[in-house]
């Protein structure tokens, strides 16, 4: 019998406004905020079918590039359609690594400047 190992309960992200950033990521991931999360709370939990994201308010602002970031893979649309949807939600395109042959990814930042990438969907990879 294998020994019990750890599992990721949630990914924690420091931020200036936990509820606002949690709301943004709930939209991005099709998740939901915890029932007891309210504007002004110092923490907000975004529940998703995969790993949950926990946003914790901290006094200091973001000053350097993330050492850890999320790579998103669209489930029901193309990479480019997902990038457009995320831009409409308030994300910012900071690095366009998409190639003419359809490969590559786009690097965006969320509404507080945290970097994340959008890769091709599984359908685009198979095609």
Image (tube, rainbow, N blue to C red):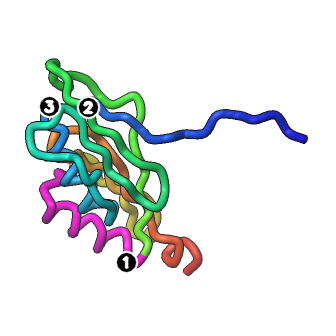
Residue 28 magenta-drawn? no
Label 1, label 2: how far apart the Cα atoms are:
30 Å
5 vs 61, nearest the viewer: 5
The mark tally for this picture is 3
Give yes or no for contact between labels 1 and 2 (Cβ–Cβ under 8 Å).
no
Q: Identify the mark at residue 45; answer none if there is no mark.
A: none
- Dot 1 or dot 2: first in sequence order is 2
Q: Quadrant of the N terminus?
A: top right
Please give the residue where the numbered disc 3 appears in the rendered image: 16
- Dot 2 or dot 3: first in sequence order is 3
Please give the residue where the numbered disc 1 appears in the rendered image: 77
Taking the view exactly as shown, the residue that stands out farthest to the top is 60
Give yes or no for contact between labels 2 and 3 (Cβ–Cβ under 8 Å).
no
Q: For the magenta stretch, what is the residue range?
A: 76-93
Under circle 2, the secondary element is strand
Callout in the foreground (1, 3): 3
Callout in the foreground (1, 2): 2
Please give the residue where the numbered disc 2 appears in the rendered image: 56
- Picture layout, residue 105 above or below residue 13: below
35 vs 95, nearest the viewer: 35
**Quadrant in the rendering for residue 59:** top left
**Quadrant in the rendering for residue 54:** top left
Give yes or no for contact between labels 1 and 3 (Cβ–Cβ under 8 Å).
no
The residue lying at 14 percent from left, 31 percent from top is: 16
Label 2, label 3: how far apart the Cα atoms are:
8 Å
99 on left or right of 82: right
Q: At which x and y percent is residue 20?
A: 13, 46
- Picture layout, residue 113 above or below residue 57: below
The residue lying at 64 percent from left, 34 percent from top is: 6
- Dot 1 or dot 3: first in sequence order is 3
Q: At which x and y percent is residue 70?
A: 40, 46
Residue 88 magenta-drawn? yes
């Amino acid at each position: 019998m294998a020994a019990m190992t750890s599992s990721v309960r949630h990914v924690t992200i420091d931020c200036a406004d936990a509820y606002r950033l949690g709301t943004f990521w709930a939209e991005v991931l099709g998740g939901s905020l915890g029932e007891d999360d309210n504007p002004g709370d110092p923490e907000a939990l975004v529940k998703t079918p995969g790993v949950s994201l926990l946003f914790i308010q901290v006094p200091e602002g973001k000053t350097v590039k993330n050492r850890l970031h999320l790579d998103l893979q669209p489930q029901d649309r193309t990479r480019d359609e997902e990038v457009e949807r995320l831009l409409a939600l308030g994300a910012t395109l900071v690095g366009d690594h998409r190639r003419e042959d359809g490969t590559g990814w786009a690097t965006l930042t969320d509404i507080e400047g945290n970097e994340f990438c959008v890769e091709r969907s599984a359908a685009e990879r198979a095609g």
